[in-house]
Amino acid sequence: MSATRVSSLSAPRLERLKNRSAAIGIIGLGYVGLPLSMLLAEAGFKVTGFDIDQKKVDSLMAGKSYIFRIPSEEIESIRSKGFTATADFSKLTDMDAIILCVPTPLNEHHEPDMSYIVDTAKMIAPWLQAGQLVALESTTYPGTTEEVLIPLLEAGNKQGLKVQGPEGEPAESGVFYVAFSPEREDPGNTTTARHNIPKVVGGHEPIAAELAATLYEGIFTRAVRVSTTQAAEMTKLLENIYRCVNIALVNEMKVLALRMGIDIWEVIDAAATKPFGFQAFYPGPGLGGHCIPIDPFYLSWKAKEFGFHTRFIELAGEVNEAMPEFVVAQVAKALNKHKKPLNGAKVLMLGMSYKKDIDDLRESPSLTLIELLRDEGAEVVYNDPYHPTVGRGRKYNLNMTSTPLENLGQYDCVLIATDHTDYDYARIVKESQLVVDSRNATKGIQADNLVRC
Ligand SMILES: NC(=O)c1ccc[n+]([C@@H]2O[C@H](COP(=O)([O-])OP(=O)(O)OC[C@H]3O[C@@H](n4cnc5c(N)ncnc54)[C@H](O)[C@@H]3O)[C@@H](O)[C@H]2O)c1
């Protein structure tokens, strides 16, 4: 890239990004956007968070967090450093860079739901300014940035701005820059500091790549540049599909190991001592969260356009989706050994979150487990310190309240669905009639009333 091209329009912004005096707008203040805003604000950038959810905006402006793992003191801290939140998109005109962190779920047909990206692009477009960088972080199929985001930004802006194209075209005075950089947040991970996770960046063209990489290098130890936005989009999907497929493999091996009377968790721990060529994945009651159960289907959907059938993804989906039913069958089998039917059994389910020590229950297998157990006639209650109540979501309507962990002997079965660290598993096994553990949370405990599955 020539120095002249950077200097005409993008140079002042590039300089502000380098010295961290740039104004950054984050769109979507959820599990991804809020922590990202915090990293940027702590690094000295002028950060404005934008969200259509006025409650979130009000909460942040009052210095209050709505995400369990983020203490309110940290919100107060970034407020004191100039962070503001707003639902007023006209303020986007003041931003040097705009980062999109909006949801990318599946619709009822298990296809990508692009409505959040489309709506957000339409909301940004009228306020877009020449020279601004727009970076998309939402996980999505390869081609979204080029085929969905850029056309909407070009069509909707008031000044007739165009995305910066290849060398010399269109004229720099009327351009904005676009990049894709996937989020690699791992909720609940306390071992890898977020800023130490390298950030993959793909620009629509070299200036956008330079601007985006400079921005992210201000908060992450390393930006990893790839040649296109599509490569960056595909990188994120490869990472999550790799995880989805390996979890399916280990789930399948667990079902077989149980039949063979082999402890799969012991096997995984032993295999994990191999210093090369093996990465440990763990079986469980099914996939959860906003990423692993969803993202692979973004690629399968796009693959159809190329006449390609993603067999690994479909098979992994099939295996993983069967896990909640497998766990319920194990509960029924364990109760049967106690001469009790599942129909009418009192079941206490431990853990509502999709994984331990977090407050996120999107796509949580616990929600499916409750549904399946109730279908079989079981009376289900739950306990989860992260979810005092569970009301209504996109795919559930539970209206349940967390039951205290008392008088455990009253339940016919205690089902461990999420292995939160705070639970005293030895006490739970000791005081319960029957414990079915789908997470190996009771590792090291031997008892006749304990079944691992
Ligand atoms: N949660 C994770 O751990 C994680 C990890 C990696 C990648 N991702 C990806 O990041 C993206 C965001 O996920 P999330 O978990 O932060 O979602 P989220 O639901 O927690 O947050 C999204 C936020 O966007 C807001 N929003 C929706 N439409 C908007 C609009 N038009 N304008 C402004 N705000 C709008 C919502 O009100 C919400 O606050 C998704 O694509 C997801 O796949 C998430």
Image: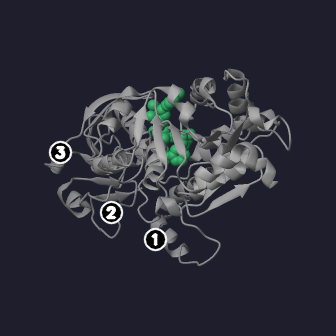
**Nearest to N terminus: mark 1 or mark 2:** 1
Q: Cβ(mark 1) to ligand 1 < 8 Å?
A: no
Q: Amino acid at mark 3?
A: Pro
Question: How many residues crowd around disc 1 within 10 Å: few (fewer than 14), some, or many (20 or more)?
Answer: few
Q: Are marks 1 and 2 in contact (CB under 8 Å)?
A: no
Secondary structure beneath disc 2? loop
Give the number of the disc on residue 404: 3
Secondary structure beneath disc 3? loop
Q: Is residue 173 left or right of residue 399?
A: right
Secondary structure beneath disc 1? helix
Image quadrant holding the N terminus, namely: bottom right
Q: Amino acid at mark 1?
A: Glu
Q: Is residue 452 left or right of residue 425?
A: right
Residue underneath mark 1: 266
Question: Where, by quadrant of the figure, is residue 447 drawn?
Answer: bottom left
- The structure residue drawn at horizontal position 50% and vertical position 60%, both measured from the top left corner, is 195
Give the number of the disc on residue 442: 2
Q: Is residue 406 left or right of residue 322?
A: left
- Percent x, y of residue 90: 52, 26
**183 vs 216, nearest the viewer:** 216
- Percent x, y of residue 157: 67, 23
In this view, the mark in front (3 or 1): 3
Distance (Cα) linking label 3 and label 2: 20 Å
**Nearest to N terminus: mark 3 or mark 2:** 3
